[in-house]
Image (cartoon, helix red, strand yellow):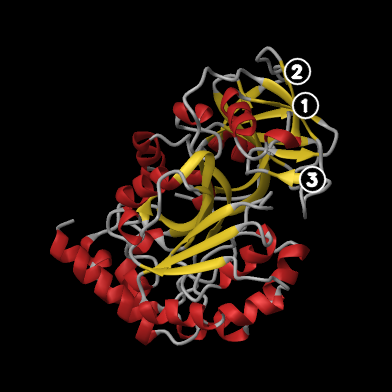
Amino acid sequence: MAAPRDAEIHKDVQNYYGNVLKTSADLQTNACVTPAKGVPEYIRKSLQNVHEEVTSRYYGCGLVVPEHLENCRILDLGSGSGRDCYVLSQLVGQKGHITGIDMTKVQVEVAKAYLEYHTEKFGFQTPNVTFLHGQIEMLAEAGIQKESYDIVISNCVINLVPDKQKVLREVYQVLKYGGELYFSDVYASLEVSEDIKSHKVLWGECLGGALYWKDLAVIAKKIGFCPPRLVTANIITVGNKELERVLGDCRFVSATFRLFKLPKTEPAGRCQVVYNGGIMGHEKELIFDANFTFKEGEAVEVDEETAAILRNSRFAHDFLFTPVEASLLAPQTKVCWTFSSLLQSGPLKDQTTGPPKTTVFFTVGYLPQLISRIFVWINDLIFFCKFFLFKDLVLFYVYGCFPQIYVCVLSAVPTEASCPGTGFTELLCGF
């Protein structure tokens, strides 16, 4: 996009969030209020300590609070009124530090106005939060040093910037090795049309600038990040007929991803890892992403990339590592059905109607290694299911709908098996 257009977008966004929107009630879609996951009790308590005005000026599309934050240095991109910064301030503690940066001056002023209030509320001697007025694609100009942060977060803001790649490159520069970008944002099922991009309300509502969902992995790889790891996602509903007409067939999801910056080392190799427990709020179970849930004291086999992330990040001391050979047991029974044949004579008979959309594999009496939870759309029916890796395939199975029968859906994109956390986005969105 040309620079003049970028400048116009920045001006429109500042006006929308500084003047048009006064509270979250002024939003015209649910894109900026869609929760990415349930709020844990310890975070709920932290939210209750944030001043009411700061909370009312919050417009995020998810909850961007990763785990193991004690003493961390965290940068919040597009910090707005400072809600997430003040939540994180409590979790990193007095020895940690939070920096919020936002290009909308009115929002920064709201955030700064309550610095003293929250410092006293949290029982700190000095503030551990700093707010900067600046653009998230120009972090160096705002005085942010290279390799100075353990974590960067962003809550439904990157879509508001025309040049997403520039933002991610800046983030990569300011992260320490072993650090991560943990962020919620909006993704589109199609390449967003010029009509949608040029619509000021849709851009302000986080839809006009949404990234085509496949592009995130491409950009991340180009910059040097590990492949994106999906944490959770939700379908966005617009609920505004006029805006729906402009959007046409393009659909959207809000999703939370993790992007890790790792040092250039030898591959870690597949490992069996045991979670030691003890991370605040996740003492008994750590839901790391949509692929892996670690329970205290239980051994879990992980792939090379996951092993490298756990070994080289702030989670290194929370796990015990044992190298293992890469192996997964094959199912005892596997029968291949086309979707149409399943409708005619298989276990899905009379369960749904419509043209076949996918090929379905199913196994009876075989429970694969369970790693994640997703939603799969099959002819507009939603099945709650889990997914696992088997050799070079990404498989899914449905449970709860058909007793004693597990239905596995084969991913259509072969490379997704080596990209955990991204392979099921297409199915999740029903694209």
How much space separates mark 2 and mark 1, taking CA atoms? 7 Å
Q: Secondary structure at mark 2?
A: loop
Query: Where on the picture, by quarter, is residue 371?
Result: top right
Tag 3: amino acid: Glu
Q: Which residue is mark 3?
A: 285
In terms of depth relative to the viewer, which is nearer, 187 or 88?
Answer: 88
**How many other residues sit within 10 Å of disc 2, few (<14), some (14-19) or many (≥20)?**
few
Q: Which residue is mark 2?
A: 332
In terms of depth relative to the viewer, which is nearer, 155 or 104?
Answer: 104
In terms of depth relative to the viewer, which is nearer, 153 or 288?
Answer: 153
Query: Where on the picture, by quarter, is residue 195?
Result: bottom left
Residue appearing at x 75%, y 43% in the figure: 402
**How many other residues sit within 10 Å of disc 3, few (<14), some (14-19) or many (≥20)?**
some
Q: Which residue is mark 1?
A: 366
Q: Secondary structure at mark 3?
A: strand
Q: Secondary structure at mark 1?
A: loop
